[in-house]
C-alpha cells in the first residue's frame, strides 16, 4: 500500500519557540490516522503544515508524492480540510459556500451542481440550502464544513476535532459519515483530543506531546506497551454503604467509583470474581453488570505525555 | 512547459474571479464600506461645494475623482482583517490557489465597486449639473485604470496582520485623507501654490482628476500620456508592494487564526 502522507523531520519555530521538533510519520492510503495530543502539543501546527497553510521551518512533507513546499497547488488539489472552528461564510447560503469551494478547486459547473446537491442531501441540509449560514445551528455548520471539505472529492481528508461540541445525533452522524468515507477509500487524518473517538475509529494513532512524537502504533498495540493493572468493573442493584470494604478482598489493589459503577484494580481479575460473588451474597446485592477492563488508550496517552513532560523538565 | 504555465495562470485568474464574486456578495453592503466608501466622500464633497461658487469644470472632476478614490480603496482593506477575524481565510489558503490569487480577487472586487459607484457622480454631473463628455474614451480608460490603481493602494493598507477591520479603516483614512488635499480636487492644479505643485505628482489621484478634467473638455495640467503613464506606474508599484507586504505578513496572520 502506498503512502498518502509522508512527513520527515518536520521542524517549526514560532520566533524562538520550537513548536515541532523533528516530527516524522507516514500515513498509508486508505487509513484513518489519529493525531492525538494535549493542548499546545503541536497538533494544529502539524495539520496546518500538512495542508499547506503554514510553511515549515525545516523537514519535508509529501502529499501523494507531491512536495507541499515545492508543489503546493498540486498537493492541495488532493486534500480536503474541515477546520475545528466553524468558519463557513455566514453571510452566504449553504449552496453558495459549497459552490465557492468547488469553484476554487476548479470543478466544472454541471459536476459541481450535482455534487453540491448530493452532499446537501447526504448531510440533511438540502431543505436549508438557500438559507444564510448565519442562522444555522453548530451541528449544521459542522456538517456544512464537512460537505465543503468533500465537494471536490479529495483523496485525503483532514479533520480537526470533528465532533467537538456537537450534540449526540450530529456527532453520531459525523462518525458514520467519516467511517463511510473511509470505506470508499478516502484517507482520513483525524486530529482530536477525544481519545475514545480515536480508539474506536482509527487504524493507527500518533501521540504528540510538546512538539515531539511520543508514540505511533495501532491503538490496541499501544495499550499493550504499558503495564497498567487490569480492573473489574461492577455495578450492583443498590449503592454500597462502604466501598472501602472491597479492598479487603484478596488481590484487590485499589477501588474507585465511576458513577454507579465500582472499579476494582487487580493484576489478576479472574481470582477476585469468586470472592466478589460471596461478598455480594453476604450483603444481599444483585449484580447488574460485571466487566473486565484492560488499560485504555487514555492511560497510554497520559502515560506517554507524562513521560515526555518529565524528559523535558529533566533536560531543563 | 509553456502551455502548462499559461494554464496555471489561467486557473489562478479564474480563482481570483471566484474570490471577487464572493467578496461582492459579502462585502459590498457592509456598513463600513457604505460609510467610508459612499457616504464619507459624498459629505466631504458637499462640505466643499455647497454654498460656494465652484465652477463646473472643478466641481465634476473633483466629485468623480473623490468618489472613485474612496470607493475603489474602501472594499479591499476591509476584507483581509474581516476574513482573519472570522477565520474564513483558512478555507481560502487551504485551497489550491496562491496568496496573490486571493489578493487579486479582493482587488478586483474593490475595482468593480469603484467603477459602479463612480457612475453616480457622473450621472449627477451630466443630468443635474449639465456637464458634457468631450473625450469619452479617455474618461472610460481613466475610470478603469484609476479604479484598479486605487484598489491596489487599498490592498497595501490591509497588510498589517490584524483581525480588527476598524484598525485598518483608521490607517487607510490616515493615508487617504491627506492625499485628496494635494491632488487638485478642491484646488485645481494650476491654482495650487508652488509647494502644492511640487507634491501633487506624488498622488495618483492627481492624474485621475487631471484626466477627468480633460475628458470633460477642460485643459489638462499634464499631458494625457503622462497622466496615463503615471497612473499605470502607480498601479504596478502598488500591486507589487501589496503582494510583497502581504506575503511577508501572511504567516503571522495565519498563525493567529
Image (spheres, grey):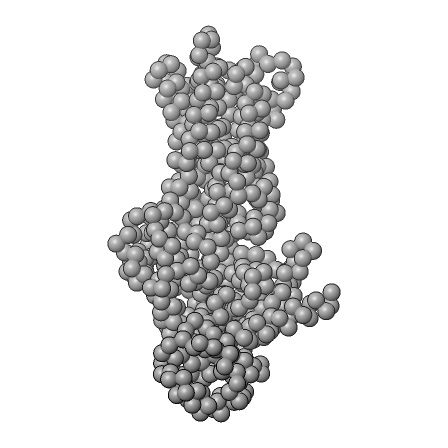
Is residue A3 among what the camera can see?
Answer: no
What residue is drawn where x is 69% and y is 67%?
Answer: A312
Q: Position of residue A270 (x, y in %)?
A: 47, 91
Numbered disc total: 0
What residue is drawn where x is 55% and y is 83%?
Answer: A253
> Which of these two is toward me, B35 or A263?
A263
What residue is drawn where x is 41% and y is 19%?
Answer: B134
In the image as oriented, which residue stretches furthest toward the left?
Answer: A127
Left or right: A20 as drawn, with respect to A267: right
In the image as oriented, which residue stretches furthest toward the top?
Answer: B53
Q: Position of residue A167 (x, y in %)?
A: 37, 61
Q: Quadrant of residue A46?
A: bottom right
A99 in relation to B176, above or below = below
> Which of these two is toward me, A21 or B49?
A21
Q: Position of residue B175 (x, y in %)?
A: 58, 29
Q: Position of residue B80 (x, y in %)?
A: 50, 43
What residue is drawn where x is 54% and y is 88%?
Answer: A251
Q: Quadrant of residue A187?
A: bottom left
Is residue B189 among what the camera can see?
Answer: yes
Left or right: A46 as drawn, with respect to B122: right
> Which of these two is toward me, A86 or B17?
A86
> Which of these two is toward me, A261 or A135?
A261
Amino acid at each position: 500500500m502506498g503512502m498518502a502522507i509522508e512527513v520527515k523531520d518536520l521542524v517549526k519555530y514560532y520566533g524562538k519557540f520550537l513548536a515541532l521538533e523533528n516530527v516524522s510519520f507516514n500515513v498509508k492510503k486508505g487509513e484513518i490516522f489519529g493525531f492525538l495530543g494535549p493542548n499546545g502539543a503541536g497538533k494544529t501546527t502539524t495539520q496546518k503544515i500538512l495542508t499547506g497553510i503554514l510553511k515549515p521551518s525545516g523537514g519535508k512533507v509529501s502529499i501523494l508524492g507531491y512536495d507541499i513546499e515545492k508543489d503546493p497547488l498540486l498537493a492541495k488539489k488532493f486534500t480536503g480540510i474541515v477546520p475545528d472552528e466553524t468558519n463557513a461564510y455566514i453571510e452566504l447560503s449553504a449552496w453558495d459556500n459549497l459552490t465557492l469551494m468547488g469553484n476554487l478547486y476548479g470543478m466544472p459547473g454541471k459536476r459541481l451542481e450535482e455534487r453540491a446537491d448530493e452532499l446537501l442531501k447526504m448531510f440533511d441540509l438540502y431543505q436549508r440550502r438557500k438559507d444564510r449560514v448565519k442562522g444555522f445551528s453548530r451541528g449544521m455548520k459542522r456538517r456544512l464544513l464537512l460537505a465543503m471539505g468533500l465537494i471536490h472529492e479529495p483523496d485525503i481528508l483532514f479533520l480537526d476535532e470533528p465532533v467537538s461540541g456537537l450534540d449526540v445525533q450530529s456527532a453520531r452522524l459525523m462518525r458514520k459519515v467519516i467511517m463511510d468515507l473511509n470505506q470508499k477509500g478516502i484517507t482520513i487524518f483525524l486530529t482530536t483530543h477525544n481519545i475514545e473517538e480515536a480508539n474506536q475509529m482509527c487504524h493507527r494513532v500518533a501521540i504528540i506531546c510538546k512538539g515531539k512524537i511520543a508514540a505511533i502504533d495501532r491503538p490496541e498495540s499501544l495499550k499493550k506497551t504499558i503495564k497498567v493493572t487490569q480492573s473489574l468493573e461492577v455495578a450492583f442493584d443498590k449503592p454500597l454503604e462502604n466501598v472501602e470494604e472491597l479492598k479487603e478482598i484478596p488481590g484487590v489493589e485499589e477501588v474507585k467509583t465511576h458513577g454507579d459503577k465500582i472499579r476494582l484494580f487487580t493484576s489478576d481479575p479472574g481470582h477476585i470474581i469468586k470472592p466478589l460473588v460471596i461478598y455480594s451474597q453476604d450483603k444481599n446485592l444483585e449484580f447488574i453488570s460485571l466487566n473486565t477492563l484492560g488499560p485504555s488508550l487514555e492511560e497510554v496517552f497520559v502515560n506517554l505525555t507524562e513521560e515526555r513532560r518529565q524528559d523535558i523538565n529533566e533536560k531543563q | 512547459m509553456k502551455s502548462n504555465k499559461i494554464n496555471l495562470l489561467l486557473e489562478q485568474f479564474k480563482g481570483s474571479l471566484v474570490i471577487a464574486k464572493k467578496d461582492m456578495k459579502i462585502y459590498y453592503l457592509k456598513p463600513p464600506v457604505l460609510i467610508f466608501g459612499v457616504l464619507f466622500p459624498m459629505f466631504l464633497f458637499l462640505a466643499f461645494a455647497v454654498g460656494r461658487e465652484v465652477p463646473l469644470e472643478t466641481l465634476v472632476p473633483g466629485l468623480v475623482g473623490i468618489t472613485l478614490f474612496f470607493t475603489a480603496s474602501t472594499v479591499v482593506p476591509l476584507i483581509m482583517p474581516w476574513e482573519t477575524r472570522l477565520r474564513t481565510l483558512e478555507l481560502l489558503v487551504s485551497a489550491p490557489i496562491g496568496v496573490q490569487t486571493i489578493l487579486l480577487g479582493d482587488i478586483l472586487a474593490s475595482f468593480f465597486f469603484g467603477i459602479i459607484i463612480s457612475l453616480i457622480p457622473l450621472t449627477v454631473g451630466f443630468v443635474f449639473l449639465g456637464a458634457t463628455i468631450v473625450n469619452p474614451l479617455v474618461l472610460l480608460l481613466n475610470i478603469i485604470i484609476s479604479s484598479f490603481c486605487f484598489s491596489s493602494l487599498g490592498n497595501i493598507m490591509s497588510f498589517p496582520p490584524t483581525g480588527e477591520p476598524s484598525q485598518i479603516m483608521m490607517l487607510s483614512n490616515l493615508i487617504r485623507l491627506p492625499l485628496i488635499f494635494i491632488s487638485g480636487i478642491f484646488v485645481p492644479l494650476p491654482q495650487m501654490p508652488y509647494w502644492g505643485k511640487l507634491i501633487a505628482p506624488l498622488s495618483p489621484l492627481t492624474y485621475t482628476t487631471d484626466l477627468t478634467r480633460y475628458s470633460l473638455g477642460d485643459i489638462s495640467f499634464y499631458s494625457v500620456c503622462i497622466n496615463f503613464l503615471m497612473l499605470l506606474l502607480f498601479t504596478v508599484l502598488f500591486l507589487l508592494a501589496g503582494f510583497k507586504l502581504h506575503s511577508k505578513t501572511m504567516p503571522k496572520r495565519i498563525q493567529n487564526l
